[in-house]
Image: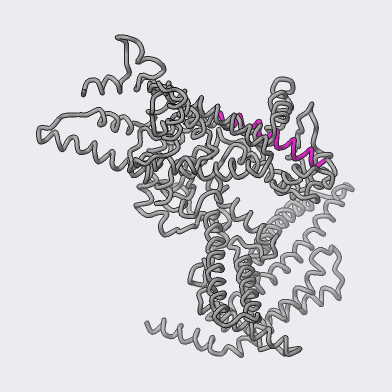
Amino acid sequence: MKDVRAFIDRVMAAERNTEGMDSRIARLEYELERFDETTDKLINERDITKAEANTAREAMDSLDAELEQVGDIANVSPRVSLIVDLATTKRNLFKQKLKANALVKRVDAIKRLDAEGGANDEILAELAAKEIELGQVRADIEGLKTKADRLEPMQPKVKSEIPEFLSPQDRADYVNQIVDDIFNQLTGRARQGMPSYDMVMTARGPLKERTFNIPDELIEDFLEQDIELIARRYARVMAADVEMTRMDKRLGGPGKPDLVGQVDRVRADYAQLRDNLNASDLDEPAKARARLELKKMEARDLEDLGSVRDILRGQYKMDSQHTNFARVMNLAQSFNFMRSLGGVLASSLADAVRPPMTHGMLRYMGEGIAPLVTNLKGVKLAVADAKLMGAVTERVLQSRLATMAELNDPYAQNSPFERFVANMANTFSKATLLPFWNDMHKSIASVLVQNRVLKNAMLDYDKLDSGEKKYMGFVGIDAHMAERIARQFDEFGDVTGNVHVPGIERWTDDGARRAFAAAVNKDVDGVIVTKGVADVPTFAHTPGGRALLQFRTFALASHQRVLMRGMQESQSRFFTGIVGMMAFGMAAYAFKQFESGREFTSNPGTWVAEGLERSGIFSIAFEINNTWEKLGGPGFFTLASLAGKTANPEADMKQPASRYANRDAFGALLGPSFQLGTDAAQLLGIPARATQGDVDLKPADINRATSMVPFYTLPYWRWFMEGGFGLQWNEGGFQGVEPALKQAVE
């Protein structure tokens, strides 16, 4: 304790002497700047004159002297220690560069001598030794450079005096800045959306550049062995941070993934609005109301900005993401996925209509379908480029299916059992065959998008018609970027038949390549609806939100990417798309009824309602309607059935939506995870009743039990369980497992 107190006293004494420390730090920084200015001129020169060498030596001696003077406080003050560390690193870096320069001269001289035939064995041995030494010195130089680059942004700022003001306005600006800072601190704006301590995570995960200096065999049991999981995490962490860093820098910020610069911009904008309000002619009560509204708007905007930033970085509400409740909900969602989405391929038949709906039937047939017959080679080349851009990856990643079921959490820390369930879900994804369906239609969509963007880029941007200009703006390409893309395509691309092959891996303009890839991915994910971060509310990214909205967030994405986009584009394509998607929705309804052995409706109104509901165009409206009807209220299916009954008096009156046939009111309102809990509780009650002599099973118990079976809903398995595909119509034949069990309990 005595030693600890003595150490604390030394640090506090050094920190109390701030004025002396600041002046000495300033001198050290001055010497460091002089050293840099002197030595930077020499590090790349092969010939250094005697005068230059003396100047460098003087700078080095001066820096050494200053380092020796501040050495006493460097040991007790982290602030000074950082500067000393940087100064020492730069001094050593220059010494090593001088040494490398001398070694290069000697190696070159020996090589010339050897080329002339004048080198003996001793000289050649010296050459080998010098080359090894040169390699070691160069490695030291790289290490010192890395250390210096790391220390640069960590350098403390020297305390500055109050500046001399050039004018009264200058003084007023200075005072206003202080007032705004105090105001932000008192109102909680200073750290809006950030931790309350002075610590912001910037470099993290793979970007920390840390070396784990422990032999693998000592910690084998604790190391992750799944290379796919490691690759997903690396890509997810690095992609988010790299893109946000670039965006921050592009928007004038310091280039950091925490977006503090953009938060400051928003805060500065609201500060300007408050100044304008204070200078206005409004009376004081009106100003007070306006200030309150500005405060609410600022809080909402900053919260939204911080939430989206944290969601992209996988840090949204971290305190709730890895609780036991969250892990149980994740397991329940994976289980729901495996027991409910086996027929998702049939439900996705309407995807086939999306390319002609967004790009037009003529373009779809001429540039999407016809090349599959006449120019398959060109299509393959274009699709290969789309894969490089990440637009056609479903068979590998199953990302679209994962977003449907709320399973995409690369940051989850899982137990062996959770890993087992996750691997089962991954296998189930492939068993549904949806990844192959997705890749097929995303491939066609990618060819259409690439053709459209490249054709527009090769034309005069100002002469494009209004529809194509809107489209180029939608995918984020302006006239300047279109010109850059056109130059790259003209140099490296090719037109094979009517297919434009960009050859993107050879492009030399990184900005054009990134803009083109972003455009293709954005539109392809809109054509074949793939949910993004901005398609759902922030509540959907919490454990409870994911459970309540499982299988529903895709409806939110479809509303944004199908209905809202379609209403703003060609009206003829939109209404044609509604008819086409409704027809495929009817086909999906027919297939689902056929595979499960349920009867078809004879009501034409119900057919139309089923087609519209399964088309995915009016997804939010039908989610609300179906839940309301399941609770007992009249809705669209009721009206459709009545209309169909009017047209065909002998038609049935089946309702509500067949997609909600196996859900109870509780599950319709609160989601499949909560219905799973109620079903499990009812099934667990059967053994409890049996102990009291009540062994009476009901058909509803069979329904609950079969709904708990993973992989049960896969079409090529479901026919055996439910007697679908016409089996139940065979008189005296096999009726299926579930019908046989129901018949037995009845």
Depth order, front residue of 471/419: 471
Q: Residue at x 68, y 32 (%)?
A: 383
Can you give x and y, in whole percent of width and height, for residue 349 in the image? 54, 28
Q: Is residue 57 above or below residue 410?
A: below
Q: Is residue 588 above or below residue 60?
A: above
Going by the image, does 471 lie left or right of 645? right
Name the residue nearer the viewer: 314 or 359: 359
Is residue 345 visible to the viewer in this orientation of the structure?
no
User: Mostly what secondary structure, the magenta segment?
Assistant: helix
Q: Residue at x 61, y 90 (%)?
A: 20
Magenta run includes residue 709: no
Q: Nearest the camera: 331 or 662? A: 662
Residue shown at the point (34%, 40%) measured from the top left: 632
Left or right relative to 683: residue 57: right
Q: Measured from the top left, where is residue 531 in percent x and y? A: 54, 44
Q: 475 above or below 649?
A: below
What residue is drawn where x is 43% and y is 34%? 637
Q: Residue furthest left?
A: 693
* Vertical order, 327 against 146 (above or below): above
- Indicate left or right for 183 with 636 as reference: right
On the image, the x and y values in percent for residue 701 come to 25, 31
Span shown in magenta: 436-458
Residue farthest to the right, as pictured: 116
Quarter containing the N terminus: bottom left
Residue 315 visible from this viewpoint: yes
